[in-house]
Image (cartoon, rainbow, N blue to C red):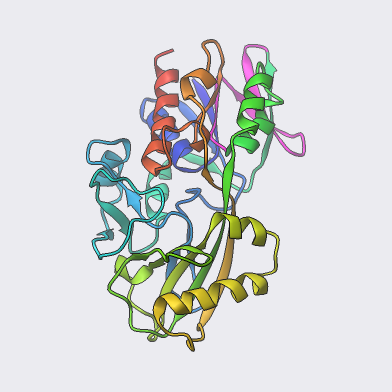
Amino acid sequence: MRIAVIGAGIAGLVAARDLSDAGHEVVVFEKSRGMGGRMAARRSEGGAVVDHGLPVLDVPRDGVLAGYVVELATDDLVEVDAPGQPVPGRSTEGAPQLAWASGMTRLPKALAHGLEVVTDTRVAAIRADGEMLEVAQDQGNTLGTYDWVIVTAPGAQAADLLDHSPRGAVRAADLRAVPYDLAVMVLAGVAVEPPEWFAHRPLTGPITYVTSETAKERAPVDGVASFVVRLDPDVSERLMEASDAAVLAEALPALAKVLGKPAATPAWTQVKRWRYSTARDRLDQQVMNPEGTRVLVAGDAVAAGPRMEDVAATGQWAARRILDS
């Protein structure tokens, strides 16, 4: 069978990996230049690797992701055991907190190895073409015909696709109603002694949490330690369209307070924005994919919870639905 997967986040890559390993022809389409979705990393102006999406990967030992980590991505794997407070979305089950010294994109890249992944390509429509499904670009150009399509984009973006797919209108309305928290992130390099903690959550102020990247075996570069600041959802919504200068004016004094260095001027800063950071509510994947549909919905809008493990499980579910058909 030929299967198109829309979205190269963790749900899409898990689905594509399982289907490809079962011998099917799979093509993954991704609108951005990179893969991994929230498992994103950047290199700063100073050369430091910084995770600006998911701060740490929670991997239950008997979960979906554990096998992939062991089989595909054990090199430069770090178990983050520095003291600190849990970051949002962490499990309370005692699962290890994992990261990669080279960046959180290490696992998505390993999952994508050997797959056909087409980046910088925005899918705009899924149309019936006889017994097949045609996938088309936003310019209207066809991207091929497929037996099945798996859509893993965030709720509103998935809804836009289902609007133009067979039997998709009712599901599109439900997906469009899924609320998401926005997230504004500040990446900063500060010439301070790295703290002993990995994550710090201030009791007051505009910050939800601060993470220290040195806890992931990323030594300071020229004495500059790297930090990721995630602003509170309400603050993020207010600053989503604001200038970088306005974001920094609010975030940096709060970061200085956390570090106990009110006079510290960062050596470098970057501002990142996530419009679909975390789903605040979720739909039932089984209900959202009734029998007979060949356009399946996976991803965080239909996950059981906020963890990356939960999102990966939706990709596995979609692959099994196809394999069992």
User: As displayed, is residue 100 above or below residue 311?
Assistant: below
Identity of the residue drawn at 48% across and 24% down: 284
Main SS of residues in magenta: strand
Question: Is residue 136 inside the magenta stretch?
Answer: yes
Location of residue 31 by image quarter: top right
Location of residue 200 by image quarter: bottom left
User: As displayed, is residue 287 above or below residue 268?
Assistant: above
Question: Is residue 257 inside the magenta stretch?
Answer: no
Identity of the residue drawn at 38% across and 56% down: 87
**Where does the image place residue 221, in percent across and percent down from the top left?**
39, 81
**Where does the image place residue 116, in percent across and percent down from the top left?**
50, 39
**Where does the image place residue 73, in percent across and percent down from the top left?**
30, 50
Identity of the residue drawn at 52% across and 36% down: 281
Identity of the residue drawn at 49% across and 30% down: 302
Horizontal side, residue 205 vs residue 86: left or right: right
* Residue at far front of view: 204
* Residue at far bottom of view: 263
User: As displayed, is residue 85 above or below residue 296?
Assistant: below
Horizontal side, residue 190 vs residue 246: left or right: left
**Where does the image place residue 66, in percent across and percent down from the top left?**
27, 41
The front one of 151 and 16 is 151
Instruction: Please tell me how many numbered marks the rendered image carries.
Output: 0
Extent of the magenta region = 130-153
The front one of 86 and 312 is 86
Horizontal side, residue 86 vs residue 129: left or right: left
